[in-house]
Image (cartoon, rainbow, N blue to C red):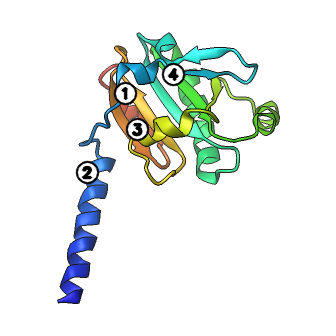
Amino acid sequence: MKTLLVIFVALLALAGGIYFKHGLYTPPVGKSDLEIAFPDLEGKPHRLTEWKGKVVIVNFWATWCPPCLEEIPEFIKLQNELGSKGLQLIGVLTDDEAEAARDFIKAKPINYPVLDGSIGGRQLTEKLGDSAGVLPISAVFDPDGKLVHVEIGIFTREEVLEKIKPWIQ
């Protein structure tokens, strides 16, 4: 009986993972969540609504997170290739130390806006469905600002292209 219970729980967890991974679940993120202001690394505040009219991918990451750093080169390429077609990547750093983040970006320039999410970033990732505090996490918004997909973990080039295909060819 105990083995059957363990198998049932494992199957339930697998089904939940598939449900989240394939975009069958859309977390409750409202328009007010997009009005949250995060400062850039110079301190100027930005709201996610600034980029309305574009397909926006907001990527929450940290300088100490190896999977996060693995994504960045592809995100830079995607911004170069598809920025003129309406794609806008935005990095939201969750590091507690802004100076370390600035040093990181000086050493490895990023061609899309990087915002400081040390205050408020974690609350937004929780609303996006990341209750475990996993990084990276990316949210895709359509040109109207509607949340259309959340990717917890590495967001590969192929997955990005598949998710933005309705708006960017």
Query: Is disc 3 placed on a helix, strand or loop?
Result: helix
What is the CA distance from the residue labelled 1 to the residue labelled 4? 23 Å
Q: Which residue is labeled 3 in the image?
A: 127
Lower sequence index among marks 3 and 2? 2
For the residues labelled 1 and 4, say whether their Cβ atoms are less than 8 Å apart: no
Amino acid type of the residue that numbered disc 4 sits on in the rendered structure: Ile
Indicate whether 102 appears above or below 1: above
What is the CA distance from the residue labelled 2 to the residue labelled 1? 19 Å
- Residue 17 appears at what percent x and percent y? 31, 56
Q: Residue 143 falls in which quadrant of the image?
A: top left
Q: Which residue is labeled 4 in the image?
A: 36
Quick one: quadrant of the N terminus?
bottom left
- 33 horizontally vs 47: left or right: left
Residue 169 visible in the current orientation: no
Give the residue displayed 28% in from the left and 37% down from the top: 26
Foreground tag (2 vs 1): 2
Give the residue displayed 59% in from the left and 32% down from the top: 92
Lower sequence index among marks 1 and 3? 3
Amino acid type of the residue that numbered disc 3 sits on in the rendered structure: Lys
Q: Which residue is labeled 2 in the image?
A: 19
Give the residue displayed 68% in from the left and 21% down from the top: 40
Q: Residue 117 falls in which quadrant of the image?
A: top right
Give the residue displayed 79% in from the left and 32% down from the top: 102
**10 Å crowding of disc 2: few (<14), some (14-19), many (20+):** few
